[in-house]
Image (spheres, grey):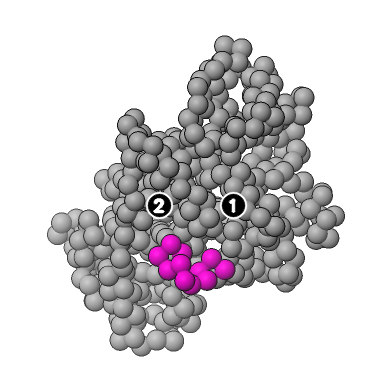
Amino acid sequence: MKQVIDQIVFVDTENYLRYHFSMSESPWASRWTKDQIKSMVLEQFEFFWNLETGIVRTQLSQVESARSVPHAVIVSGLRRAGKSTLLAQLAHKLGSDQFYYVNFEDDRFLGFEADDANDLYQILLEVFGERKIFIIDEVQNITGWEHFVRRFMDMGFKFYITGSNASLLSKELGTRLTGRYVPIELFPFSFKEYLEFREEEIPNLKRMTTIQHARLQSSLQTYLESGGIPDVLKYPELPLLRTLYDDVLYRDIATRYRLDDVTAIRELAFYLISNPTSLISFNKLKDQLRLGSVNTIKNYISYMENSWLVFTLNVYDYSVKRQQIAPKKIYCIDTGLVNKVGFGFSPNTGKLLENLVFLTLRRTTQDIYYFSSPGGYEVDFYLPETRQLIQVTQNLNNAPTREREVRALQDAIQVLNPKSALILTDANGKDFEIDGVTVRIRSAAEWMLNP
């Protein structure tokens, strides 16, 4: 192992640990002069500090609540979902003299390795002085990053880290930072955040006028179409959704997993995003798209899940084996991506609405299933923790539609004996009971503001 530390000096002042290093020889460090690296970190810091912080994200309170504990805070989520902005909001609460900032997405860090952390720290000390907090963007780009994070944590440093690969982060966190990290997932804007971003009224749900109901329903429709990715909403004239989609497929998946056949995963991703809320079978996908083996399909979908592009949902069953082999439902991270990247003959508001309901649920829990009754009826969501059934439908004006939704709940109630049931649609309705279980009918738009 290369020698990177020439001298360590312990300074007792304010419990800080001061390091004095000389630059070591490494493939990364040898590409740059010391002055160039100083300019690099200074430019990154100034860019980060001057980011528009925008609306306060809901997850900021979670990040702040972890300030008092020594654990690393790991914020993971889709590219451009606002992870850097979230940490910029934190940074402005900390103050510009309290933290170091490093963005490993910067191509000037190509070749950087965990062993280079000491050299980088020396530069940060010389440029900014002694600080005890690191804010690091896109850490998954550095092989072995968890080694230097753990080492510096042991010396009393606090870390706030973002990453765009759920599997990579969880694996490394599990092996090196076990029990010493706080995971936070960041999704695109929720409906409430979307309204705040557009500076639209968030009504008092207990006292709403007819006009407010209509406005809220109209806002939900535009949210269904545009999605909630901040930059896409900020710059609607740019093709950012297509660029984001390509970045995820090529940079986060094909490059990271060293896939030779990019066409295959692109065809699969296009099919999945074009069919949100649909049931999928690995065997049928293999035959339909002619994409190698079932394992190939499984792996490709897991890569998309790890990169926050799609989610899969298992059927709820007391048999774990049946949960695994039964068809899965597919959901996309953003309905704007479905509209701009997927293919459809006409807008399917019902499917997009179900996708939004899933994302609203997923923000607070991972314990979500769909339910398929012995009679062949399907309930969109079942939450075992609260024992709640949820159906989603565009409206209940059509008698056959209402009968189908109610019959599905009736079958599920007989099997699962839930505590409650909910139908989310375009307007509030009168509660009713099925076998002693109260079924509420709520406006999906209102529910998303207060789920």
* Magenta stretch, residue numbers: 232-242
Viewed as shown, does residue 358 lie left or right of 44? right
Residue 273: where, in percent of width, then height? Answer: 65, 56
Residue 363: where, in percent of width, then height? Answer: 47, 43
Mark 2 Cα-neighbour bin, 10 Å: few <14, some 14–19, many ≥20: many
Residue 148 seen by the camera: no
Viewed as shown, does residue 180 lie left or right of 122? right
The structure residue drawn at horizontal position 34% and vertical position 86%, both measured from the top left corner, is 36
Q: The disc labelled 2 sits on which kind of residue?
A: Tyr
Mark 1 Cα-neighbour bin, 10 Å: few <14, some 14–19, many ≥20: many
Considering only vertical position in the picture, is 236 above or below 227? below
Helix, strand or loop at label 1? It is: strand
Considering only vertical position in the picture, is 364 above or below 309? above
Tell me which corner region of the image, top left, top right, bottom left or bottom right, holds residue 412: top right
Helix, strand or loop at label 2? It is: helix
Considering only vertical position in the picture, is 136 above or below 72? below
Circle number at residue 350: none
Tell me which corner region of the image, top left, top right, bottom left or bottom right, holds residue 151: bottom left
Is 234 covered by the magenta stretch?
Answer: yes
Circle number at residue 332: 1
The structure residue drawn at horizontal position 75% and vertical position 38%, both measured from the top left corner, is 326
Viewed as shown, does residue 289 lie left or right of 334? right
Q: State which quarter of the image contains the C terminus.
A: top left
Q: The disc labelled 1 sits on which kind of residue?
A: Cys
The structure residue drawn at horizontal position 43% and vertical position 86%, both measured from the top left corner, is 30
Circle number at residue 194: 2
Viewed as shown, does residue 207 lie left or right of 28? left
